[in-house]
Image: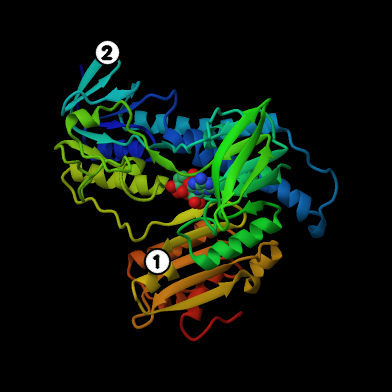
């Protein structure tokens, strides 16, 4: 039996970051992970592999659609799916090995296996029980199920199966127009599949700025994705390797069906806490399966903390990382803090979609007086040169004080552009602060400045 200051359960972005920060702050730390590699869902079957496939398929799209116009002629590209999967796996390996290196560097013990907490201060893995002054549960999430749809990871897949299909499907039906559905749908559309997205609501990407939702759907349609909106999926039957998805159109209750070689179920994720023994310990869990914590990520049971997808809040790797760092700081007797009002969210399609802070709908609901500064990438020289001028930056600022309340971007590198606004919001900046900051020309970031200018006396290139 080994004894630690902290044992972290789970090595995803929340868990491994918490472990590293605990070790850096002088705490004797171990991290329990049952997978063969570190990094959790994000590195092994989520963010990282999907970004490799998004990148490869985007390169193909560029070659097919924009190369000739730029004067690049010659060999046409074809898809070697096996090699693309090897590239994806190499990307995963490079990242998971990186975490292993960081664990060694920081003297963190990786306890291999699945953990349970038999009593406060103890973590059991296999036949061994280890002692820990504090335990951080960072056990993450798993795909939610949908009644009538059975995932076999062959014909009907979750995001995990969608990253390792045996071949590129002729017809792919995606259930759910959320982040996973649209990222994976974009990949297979670019690789040659017919992609139909069946969505329960009337708009894609629930919770996003309505104008972004509309523009995003228009662009995806232009790229060839088909949408069946307002459709509640009732069942999915598989016969001889073909799937039939049955749905009800909410506007008139009519029933319809669609056939597919492959179906991706992407209707959300739920906290994963199986086998930890939290209920027996009396840890409070919400109706949605989330571990309840206080402002310092401690559960109602002293010495047991929880972070990331397993607790409340957006299921995002970077939110989990922030909580991991802050929780470690609390355990080291410091002041850990996460600003939940400034957590960006990015969809890595092409163009990318990025958002932070309040949407217009939320501000209206709060009865808050606000102004809108909007700038189209059509007025951005760099975007035009790169065939990437579809989209806009929209900054929402307080009508009186000019303080930035939110930003919504659809366009090239939106996921990177959003961060200057995040920093500005973190410092409580006004739109004018961004507008008065010199931005290099020609960069996409000028579109952010122009949107900030549009909150005041007006954008220059509009
Ligand atoms: P989601 O919650 O983003 O979207 C699920 C969609 O499915 C919703 O639009 C919902 O209305 C629809 N839906 C639900 N039931 C349905 C039914 N019966 N028929 C038709 N449509 C139905 O969930 P998603 O895309 O599975 O993502 C799960 C989590 O993973 C999210 O929290 C997301 O933030 C996170 N994630 C984040 C990524 C990123 O930041 N780039 C990438 C991938 C996942």
Q: Is residue 299 left or right of residue 338?
A: left
Q: Quadrant of residue 434?
A: bottom left
Image point 51% across, 66% down: which residue? 210
Residue 310 locus on image (x, y percent): 33, 40
Residue at the outermost bottom position: 457
Residue 127 locus on image (x, y percent): 27, 13
Image point 63% across, 31% down: which residue? 85
Residue density around tag 2, few if under 14, some if 14–19, many if 20 or more, within 10 Å:
few
Image point 56% across, 33% down: which residue? 157
Q: Quadrant of residue 397?
A: bottom left
- The residue labelled by disc 1 is 358
Identify the secondary structure beneath mark 1: loop
- The residue labelled by disc 2 is 127
First reached walking from the N terminus: tag 2 or tag 1: 2
Q: Quadrant of residue 165?
A: top right
Residue 54 locus on image (x, y percent): 61, 45
What's the image's color scheme? rainbow
Q: Is residue 350 left or right of residue 15?
A: right
Q: Is the distance from the Cβ of mark 2 to the nearest ligand 1 atom less than 8 Å?
A: no
Residue 47 locus on image (x, y percent): 50, 42
Residue at the outermost top position: 127
Judge by depth and name the residue closer to the eye, 169 or 405.
169
Image point 56% across, 70% down: which residue? 447
Judge by depth and name the residue closer to the eye, 98 or 370.
370
Judge by depth and name the residue closer to the eye, 193 or 334.
193
Identify the secondary structure beneath mark 2: loop
Q: Is residue 364 left or right of residue 347?
A: left
Residue density around tag 1, few if under 14, some if 14–19, many if 20 or more, within 10 Å:
many
Question: Is residue 83 something that shows in the picture?
Answer: yes
In the rendered image, the vertical position of residue 249 relative to residue 300, given as above or below: below
C-alpha separation, residue under disc 2 versus residue under disc 1: 49 Å
Quadrant holding the N terminus = top left
């Amino acid at each position: 039996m080994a004894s630690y200051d902290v044992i972290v359960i789970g090595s995803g972005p929340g868990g491994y970051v918490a472990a590293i920060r605990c070790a850096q702050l002088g705490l004797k730390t171990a991290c329990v992970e049952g997978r063969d590699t570190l990094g959790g869902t994000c590195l092994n079957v989520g963010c990282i592999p999907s970004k490799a496939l998004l990148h490869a398929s985007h390169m193909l799209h560029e070659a097919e659609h924009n190369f000739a116009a730029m004067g690049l002629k010659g060999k046409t590209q074809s898809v070697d799916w096996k090699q693309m999967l090897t590239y994806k796996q190499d990307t995963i390996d490079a990242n998971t090995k990186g975490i292993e290196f960081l664990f060694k560097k920081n003297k963190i013990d990786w306890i291999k296996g699945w953990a349970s907490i038999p009593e406060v201060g103890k973590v059991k893995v296999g036949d061994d029980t280890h002692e820990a002054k504090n335990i951080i549960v960072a056990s993450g999430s798993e795909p939610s199920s949908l009644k009538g749809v059975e995932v076999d990871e062959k014909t009907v897949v979750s995001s995990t199966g969608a990253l390792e299909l045996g071949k590129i499907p002729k017809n792919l039906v995606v259930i759910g127009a959320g982040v996973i559905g649209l990222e994976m749908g974009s990949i297979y559309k670019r690789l040659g599949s017919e992609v139909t997205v069946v969505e329960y609501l009337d708009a894609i990407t629930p919770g996003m700025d309505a104008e972004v939702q509309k523009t995003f759907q228009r662009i995806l349609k232009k790229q060839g994705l088909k949408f069946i909106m307002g459709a509640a999926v009732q069942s999915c039957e598989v016969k001889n390797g073909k799937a039939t998805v049955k749905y009800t159109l909410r506007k008139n209750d009519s029933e319809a069906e669609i056939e597919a070689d492959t179906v991706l179920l992407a209707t959300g994720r739920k906290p994963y806490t199986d086998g930890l023994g939290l209920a027996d310990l009396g840890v409070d869990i919400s109706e949605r399966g989330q571990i309840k914590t206080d402002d310092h990520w401690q559960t109602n049971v002293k010495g047991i903390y929880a972070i990331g997808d397993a607790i409340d809040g957006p299921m995002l790797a970077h939110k989990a990382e922030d909580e991991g760092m802050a929780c470690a700081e609390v355990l080291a007797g410091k002041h850990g803090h996460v600003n939940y009002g400034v957590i960006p969210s990015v969809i890595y399609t092409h163009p990318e979609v990025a958002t932070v802070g309040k949407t217009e709908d939320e501000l209206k609901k709060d009865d808050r007086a606000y102004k809108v500064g909007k700038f189209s990438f059509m007025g951005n020289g760099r975007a035009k040169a790169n065939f990437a001028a579809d989209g806009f930056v929209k900054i929402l600022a307080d009508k009186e004080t000019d303080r930035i309340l939110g930003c919504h971007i659809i366009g090239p590198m939106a996921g990177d552009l959003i961060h200057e606004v995040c920093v500005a919001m973190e410092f409580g900046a006004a739109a004018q602060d961004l507008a008065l900051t010199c931005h290099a020309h020609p960069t996409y970031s000028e579109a952010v400045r122009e949107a900030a200018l549009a909150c005041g006396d007006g954008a220059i290139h509009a």
